């Protein structure tokens, strides 16, 4: 039995190292009208640099309306002002519905490097809400 314990511990350690630091930013989009996740929403991430914005990443929500790792892998999310833009017009067009908001931008402040942030978006054709999730 003692022979298997070091092997098991080594396997657990390797697994934890392979996983690395979890991605600091995730998003989730739910369609308030249907009560279902919003699949296929393009989401862009930018960081404020002076008076402008620098694009860092783009991804598309999965079947559950989520992007679990929006921040670029292997990079630290430093303190600063960031913007997540949900391309809601394209999403509603794809499901053959009109919308008042062609995109929804959420600007937020990161105060601690790699703090875990989750930005949910509750979406309808003519309104939306968001908050800082965990």
Image (cartoon, rainbow, N blue to C red):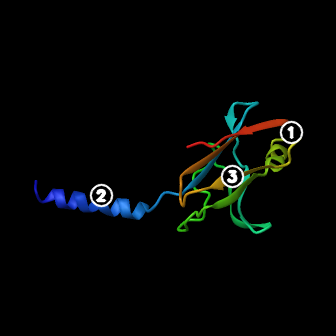
Indicate the quadrant where residue 129 lies. top right
User: Which mark is on residue 97?
Assistant: 1
Q: Residue at x 79, y 67 (%)?
A: 52
The residue lying toward the viewer, choosing from 75 and 93, is: 75
Q: Earlier in the sequence, mark 2 or mark 1?
A: 2
Q: Please report the residue visible at 55 percent of the width from the left and 56 percent of the height from the top.
A: 24
What number is the disc on residue 108?
Answer: 3
Q: Secondary structure at mark 2?
A: helix
Query: Which tag is nearer the camera, tag 1 or tag 3?
Result: 3
Q: Is residue 22 visible?
A: yes
Q: Nearer the viewer, mark 2 or mark 1?
A: 2
Residue at the location (85% across, 35% down)?
Answer: 126
Q: Is residue 124 visible?
A: no
Q: Residue 97 placed where, x, y %?
A: 86, 39
Helix, strand or loop under label 1: loop
Q: Is residue 23 above or below residue 93?
A: below
- Residue at 59% across / 42% down in the picture? 133
Measuring from the top left, give residue 12's x and y in whole percent: 30, 57
**Dot 3: element:** strand
> Disc 3 or 2, which lies upstream in sequence?
2
Instruction: Residue 10: give its label.
Output: none
Q: Is residue 83 left or right of residue 22?
A: right
Query: Which residue bears the numbered disc 2?
Result: 12
Circles 1 and 3: CB atoms closer than 8 Å: no
What is the spatial separation of the Cα atoms under label 2 and label 1, in whole angstroms? 48 Å
**Structural crowding at the residue carrying mark 1, measured as other residues with C-alpha within 10 Å and reported as few (<14), some (14–19) or many (≥20):** few
Spatial CA span between label 1 and label 3: 29 Å
* 59, above or below 98, in the image: below
Distance between the alpha carbons at the discs numbered 3 and 2: 36 Å
Mark 1 or 3, nearer chain start: 1
Q: Position of residue 1 (x, y in %)?
A: 10, 53
Tally of marks: 3
């Amino acid at each position: 039995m003692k022979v298997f314990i070091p092997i098991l511990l080594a396997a657990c350690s390797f697994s934890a190292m392979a996983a690395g630091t979890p991605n600091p930013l995730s998003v989730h989009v739910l369609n308030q009208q249907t009560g279902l996740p919003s699949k296929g929403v393009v989401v862009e991430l930018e960081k404020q640099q002076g008076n402008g914005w620098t694009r860092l990443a783009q991804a598309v929500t999965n079947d559950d309306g989520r992007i679990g790792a929006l921040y670029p892998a292997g990079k630290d999310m430093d303190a600063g002002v960031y913007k997540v833009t949900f391309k809601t017009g394209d999403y509603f067009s794809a499901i053959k519905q009109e919308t008042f908001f062609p995109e929804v931008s959420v600007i937020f402040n990161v105060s601690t490097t790699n703090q875990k942030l989750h930005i949910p978006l509750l979406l309808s054709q003519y309104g939306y809400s968001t908050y800082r999730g965990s």
